[in-house]
Image: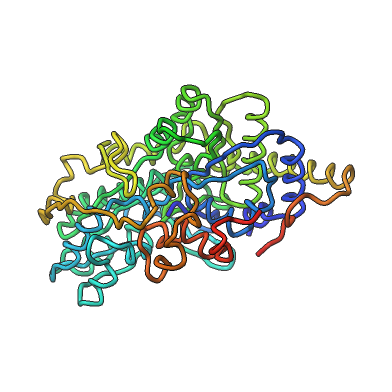
């Protein structure tokens, strides 16, 4: 229910006074309402829930957070050879 | 896909698990509120990868699961009327009411349609002016702005054949109930990332302070959840109890103001019954009186009959994190996704359905293997 997915704004138009965007999610493109993210721009990512964008993805925060995670991973790779307990990061 | 694939990176997952394992010295019980997060934890086997000292229990954040029996019965009454087109999210169709469910009513000839957005229900209403279109507006704060917008737009357009059966619930009052309940074991919370995308996380600060419990707003991918767990363990091991935000790429402290304003225009806070849990004060949203013409309960004057849950269903304790789905004697035998006793076995976000899908081998031992 609270499932929401990031997608990239490809184009925007105004339809009956409401801002609507074509948003790309991987291989598919869907129409998304931008009523709740009035400042969103073409090329930006938005998080979409039941046909509405509920946030503009903060690319800076994402970048910073991901850099920290990568740094931690490379430190881990250098410093410790033993595998973590349990099944380890298997994917289904 | 960008902003998804990188949060499923196996090497980062291993590094986070290593970090958590080094930090944890004592047993801790953590709860993720949101059913979407429960699903990720089960799907990727995160609960099995964590050190045995960390126990994950699953919270009530499954809107389909907590929609009260009375609301389902009202939906069934309305959907059975010949002039009605009843539009609902697909998950609601198999949720048992006191006597039947929407899928059976549909099989008997009712016009029940699955939609993915309230906007689709508006579209149906425009296309069928001779019928009365009712949307089943369930959900948490994440979904409330979209529902509010649908009602707002219907009023603006003068769309008189559209109404909504509203059964919206709010997360913070449920957390308060959980933390106040005797026998609560939860010591740290992963707060729901998309609810907080809309509402912000400032409301959780008072809860964290009052109950001295750490909370981390978490995203929905495996790396998000592992990072949130790592942050919680770090707080717990150092004796801190704060609200932190792991999901900063989507969540701010204030949340989405335009979305909140639309909710406030259309809805007001009310007491609400949660299925399996009971009445929770100030935990729901209903339409404001000026939108009464769009309130399906008033439009159709539905009756409310007291309804009881089946005794053999443990959903209340599962929703409160007191029991695991596999503790239930009916799990996988009397209760399956095809023939559910309770809502947590129906919804893809329900803890019972997630265990059934990913942990069925545990049935029989009544113990989830680590």
Looking at the image, residue B112 sits to the left or right of residue A78; the answer is: left
The front one of B21 and A50 is: B21
The residue positioned 38% from the left and 46% from the top of the image is: B140
Residue A49 appears in the figure: yes
Q: In this view, does A22 lie to the left or right of B263?
A: right
The percent coordinates of residue B363 (x first, y second) are 54, 63
Count how many numbered circles sit on residues in the image: 0
B104 horizontally vs B90: left or right:
left
* Viewer-proximal residue among A12 and B111: B111
Q: Residue at x 71, y 36 (%)?
A: B24
Q: On screen, B240 above or below B4? A: above
Classify the position of the N terminus of chain B by image quarter: bottom right
* Left or right: residue B307 compared with residue B259: left
Q: In this view of the protein, which residue sits in the foreground, B82 or B255? A: B82
Q: How is the image coloured?
A: rainbow
Q: Position of residue B281 (x, y in %)?
A: 29, 34
Q: Residue at x 23, y 69 (%)?
A: B127
Q: Where is residue A44 in the image (x, y as percent from the top left)?
A: 57, 49
Asked if residue B179 is positioned above or below residue A78 in the image, the reply reads: above
In terms of image quadrants, where is residue B335? Answer: bottom left
> From this viewpoint, is residue A17 visible?
no
Say above or below: A12 vs B148: below
């Amino acid at each position: 229910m609270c499932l929401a997915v990031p997608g990239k704004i490809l184009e925007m138009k105004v339809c009956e006074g409401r801002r609507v965007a074509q948003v790309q999610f991987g291989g598919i493109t869907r129409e998304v309402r931008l009523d709740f993210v009035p400042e969103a721009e073409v090329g930006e990512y938005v998080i979409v829930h039941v046909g509405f964008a509920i946030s503009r993805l903060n690319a800076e925060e994402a970048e910073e957070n991901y850099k920290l995670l990568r740094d931690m991973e490379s430190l881990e790779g250098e410093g410790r050879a033993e595998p973590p307990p349990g099944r380890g990061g298997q994917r289904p | 896909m960008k902003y998804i694939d990188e949060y499923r990176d196996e090497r980062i997952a291993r590094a986070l698990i290593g970090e958590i394992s080094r930090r944890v010295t004592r047993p801790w019980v953590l709860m993720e509120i949101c059913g979407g997060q429960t699903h990720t934890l089960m799907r990727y086997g995160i609960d099995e990868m964590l050190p045995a000292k960390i126990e994950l229990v699953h919270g009530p954040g499954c809107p389909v699961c907590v929609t009260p029996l009375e609301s389902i019965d009202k939906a069934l009454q309305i959907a059975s009327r010949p002039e009605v087109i009843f539009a609902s999210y697909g998950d609601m169709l198999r949720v048992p009411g006191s006597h039947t469910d929407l899928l059976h009513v549909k099989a008997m000839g009712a016009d029940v349609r699955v939609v993915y957005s309230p906007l689709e229900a508006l579209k149906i209403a425009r296309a069928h002016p001779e019928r009365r279109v009712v949307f089943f507006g369930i959900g948490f704060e994440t979904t409330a702005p979209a529902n509010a917008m649908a009602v707002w737009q219907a009023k603006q357009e003068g769309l008189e054949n559209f109404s909504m059966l509203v059964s919206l619930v709010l997360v913070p009052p449920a957390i308060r109930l959980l933390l106040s309940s005797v026998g609560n074991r939860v010591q740290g919370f992963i707060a729901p990332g998309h609810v907080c995308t809309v509402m912000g996380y400032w409301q959780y600060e008072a809860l964290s302070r009052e109950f001295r419990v750490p909370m981390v707003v978490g995203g929905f991918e495996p790396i998000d959840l592992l990072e949130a767990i790592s942050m919680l363990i770090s707080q717990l091991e150092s004796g801190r109890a704060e609200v932190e935000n792991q999901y900063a790429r989507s969540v701010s402290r204030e949340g989405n103001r335009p979305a909140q304003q639309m909710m406030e225009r259309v809805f007001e806070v009310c007491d609400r019954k949660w299925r399996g849990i009971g009445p929770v004060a100030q935990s729901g949203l209903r339409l404001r009186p000026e939108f009464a013409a769009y309130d399906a309960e008033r439009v159709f004057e539905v009756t409310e009959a007291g309804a009881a849950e089946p005794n053999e269903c443990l959903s209340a304790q599962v929703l409160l994190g007191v029991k695991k789905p596999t503790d239930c004697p009916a799990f996988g035998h009397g209760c399956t996704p095809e023939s559910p006793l309770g809502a947590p076995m129906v919804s893809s976000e329900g803890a019972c359905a997630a265990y059934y899908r990913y942990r069925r081998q545990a049935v029989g031992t009544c113990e989830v293997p680590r």
